[in-house]
Image: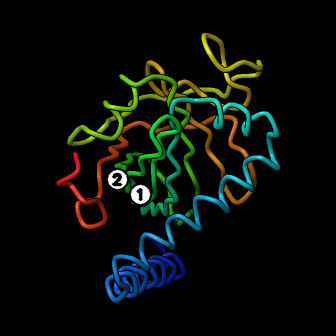
Amino acid sequence: MNMKGVRLFALTLALLLLGTLSVSAKSLDEERAELQEKREWTLAELYEEIPSAQYAIENSYGYAVLNNTGVKVLLFGSAHGRGTAVNNETGEEVFLRMQEGQMGLGIGAKEYALIFVIETPEAWEGFVRSSGWKASGSATAAANDGVSGGSIEGAALAADGIWVYQLTTKGLALELSIKGTRIYPDKDLNDLSKH
């Protein structure tokens, strides 16, 4: 790695650490409000890219929005993020965390959002109640319209009953990889006594 690469890595790492420190100084209510605001902003961006996504999300059993930051240096990379899941049937909101490990040559940082469409109660329970929902593999976004039993335009099938959109700073990602992604409830932001 050349000197420029080392400086970029050091700057990226410093920014991530500063972001973590500033988050810890916020109250839990402020953190929840910030994640809810990010969710609404992200959904508005998605609906602008793919108008049919609004119908798919509003008519699903539930959905989740996670905003993530990824860093890759040489062969190793990781991403972390936070967000919320909303049950359209019950109104329940669950705060989530995400971690992802990556292998492969590269250097840099990126921000992106994952928006999950959850079609069934079983898929919802597996996604928000487990000690960590895990995804593996890559997928290509679907080109067809439909919600139940068919594909969802612009989304990729992540698991049985779960579709995912990925937004980057360049717009909707047509090829996405969620391999090694683990999503789990945020113990600090959820009132676990309710579940």
Residue 99 - label: 2
Give the camera-side residue of 21 and 39: 39
Dot 1 or dot 2, earlier in sequence: 1
Helix, strand or loop at mark 2: strand
Disc 1 + disc 2, Cβ < 8 Å = yes
Q: Is residue 144 left or right of residue 40?
A: right
- Compare residues 77 and 3 and report the one nearer the observer: 77
In the rendered image, the residue lying farthest to the left is: 193
Q: Residues within 10 Å of mark 1 (few under 14, many from 20)?
A: some
Residue situated in front as seen by the camera: 106 or 195: 195
Q: Secondary structure at mark 1?
A: strand
- Given residues 121 and 45, the one toward you in this image is 121
Q: Is residue 180 left or right of residue 11?
A: left
Please, which residue is most extreme toward the top here? 149
Residue density around tag 2, few if under 14, some if 14–19, many if 20 or more, within 10 Å: some
Taking the spot 46% from the left edge, 83% from the top edge, the residue there is 15
At label 2, the amino acid type is Gln
Amino acid bearing label 1: Ala
Q: Which residue is mark 1?
A: 79
Q: Is residue 25 above or below residue 125?
A: below
Residue 26 picture quarter: bottom left
Q: Where is residue 135, by image quadrant? A: top left
Q: CA distance from mark 1 to mark 2?
A: 6 Å
- In this picture the colour scheme is rainbow
| 183 up-or-down from 44: above or below | above
Image point 51% across, 36% down: which residue?
62
